[in-house]
Image: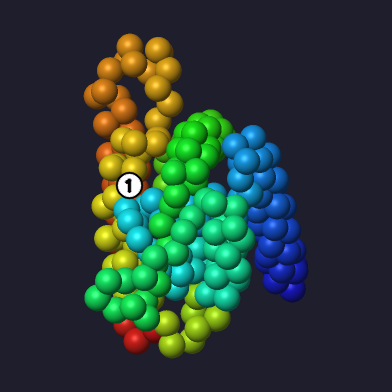
Amino acid sequence: MKTNLKSEIDILKLWRQLHQTHALLKRCEDQIFYEYGLTTEQFSVLVTIDYFTGPTKVTDIANWLERSTNSISMIVDRMVKAGLVRRIRDRSDRRVVHVVNTSKGENAFKPATKGSFEIIRKILLQLSYEDRSTLLSLLGTMKYEILKYLNPGVDIEEVKRNELEQAANVKEWLNEYGLPSTPQVKRQGGEKRDQEKDRMTKSIKSTYASSRRAVPQGSQ
């Protein structure tokens, strides 16, 4: 009985901790992006379009951000009015509409990306490499369980394959926006930066592999 009670209390504590951490992270992001004239939602759309390296459909942005298509469509509407993005029709199929970043959006997005990554990196580097890898794996497991709850028919293996393909862009993205370009880092040379990027990519791949082994066949 005591064991069950302790387990239930731990679950409640973890639930509360997750909510508080998410809320604090959101406040941190709001503060950072405000300095560059963006909201966190606007930045999320801009970074998604940039990550897909070109014109992106609203449905793809929504899927990437785990948001509904309607909510992202309304955000995009406001961003179009603000001059941060614009809509263009597909040349081969006029029914398909893509969203692209404007020069105004790019001018706000690029410094905001570097500034925010520097802050988030500073926070996460308080954890050891092993702890970061463990946290990434545990959050991934939670995410898959939530996805199965929201959509019982979801193909988790397909989700993981897509994540693995997307992880291939991590090093390229970091090269452009990631590690801070301070004199101290420059003196350390490119080798250390490459090692850090390789570690991040390997961590994502190992998370995929371990979580794949953990999902029983037929559980999807």
Query: How far from the left and from the top, in percent, is residue 65?
Result: 50, 63
Residue 1 percent coordinates (x, y): 74, 73
Q: Quadrant of the C terminus?
A: bottom left
Q: Nearer the viewer, residue 19 or 31?
A: 31
* 159 relative to 122 in the view: left or right: left
Residue at position x 37%, y 52% in the image: 51
Q: Residue at x 26, y 52 (%)?
A: 168
Please determine whether, in this image, residue 36 is positioned above or below residue 11: above
**Which percent across, then down, holds residue 101?**
43, 52
SS at mark 1 in the image: helix
Residue occupied by mark 1: 170
Q: Quadrant of residue 171?
A: top left
Residue 187 in the figure: left or right of residue 140? left
Q: Is residue 104 above or below residue 126?
A: below
x 24%, y 24%: residue = 191
Relative to the observer, which residue lies in front, 49 or 197? 49
Say which amino acid is labelled 1: Val
Task: Pick whichever, 133 or 81, lies toward us.
Answer: 81
